Amino acid sequence: MTAVRNGAYWQLRLMPGEEIVATIAGFVRRRRIKSGFLTAIGAAEDLTLGCFDPKKRVYHQRTFRGDCEVAALVGNVAWDGGNPLCHIHAVISTPRLTTFAGHLFSGTVTVTLEVALLPGARRLGRRPDPLSGLKLLHLPA
């Protein structure tokens, strides 16, 4: 991955073979980014997307093998204790131009992934939500 500060935000370029979520989280940890908003485009393979079922409190997941266009990633960055947590949703397109969307669990860059990460001034965290069982963004008063 390469990165450059571009005014108020960071511009990242992930390289082929890099795992998307882990690479972004590693950057957040190394740069001590307190919170943030991110968006990205590019290409990746072995993308695992999910959709949360609130009644069963589980994610239904599907993995897309082969090269896909990453038409859009959007997400945020917060902390779960001492670990950065990137909550990212993705819209991907298969070679037949069929689109799929959901929560991004994982994916490996094939050509590039160009990420814009806008850091926040305050450290934000996530806390367990008893209703959903998910660790939701905690916004202090």
Image (cartoon, rainbow, N blue to C red):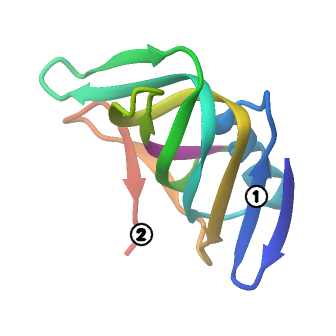
Which of label 2 and label 1 is nearer to you? 1
Determine if the magenta segment contains residue 18: no
Q: Nearer the viewer, residue 44 or 98?
A: 98
Where does the image place residue 113, in percent across and percent down from the top left?
A: 68, 47
Residue found at x 30% / y 40%: 129
Residue 50's x, y, as percent? 36, 26
Dividing the picture into quadrants, the one containing residue 130 is: top left
Q: Secondary structure at mark 2?
A: loop
- Could you say where residue 31 lies in the image, as x and y percent from the top left? 82, 60
Residue at the limit of the structure toward the left, as seen here: 55
Q: Which mark is residue 12?
A: 1
| Callout 1: SS | strand
Q: Quadrant of residue 94?
A: top left
Label 2 Cα neighbours within 10 Å, binned few <14 / some 14-19 / many ≥20:
few
Q: Report the residue at 58% width, 55% height from top.
A: 40
Instruction: From the viewer's side, name the closer residue of 116 and 29.
Output: 116
Instruction: Left or right? Give the position of 111 relative to 78.
Output: right
Tell me the magenta residue range. 84-90
Mark 2 = which residue?
Answer: 140
| Amino acid on which disc 2 is placed | Pro
The image shows residue 21, relative to residue 136, as above or below, that is above
Q: Which quadrant, please, contains the C terminus?
A: bottom left
What residue is rendered at 17% in x and 29% in y?
54
Secondary structure character of the magenta stretch overall: strand
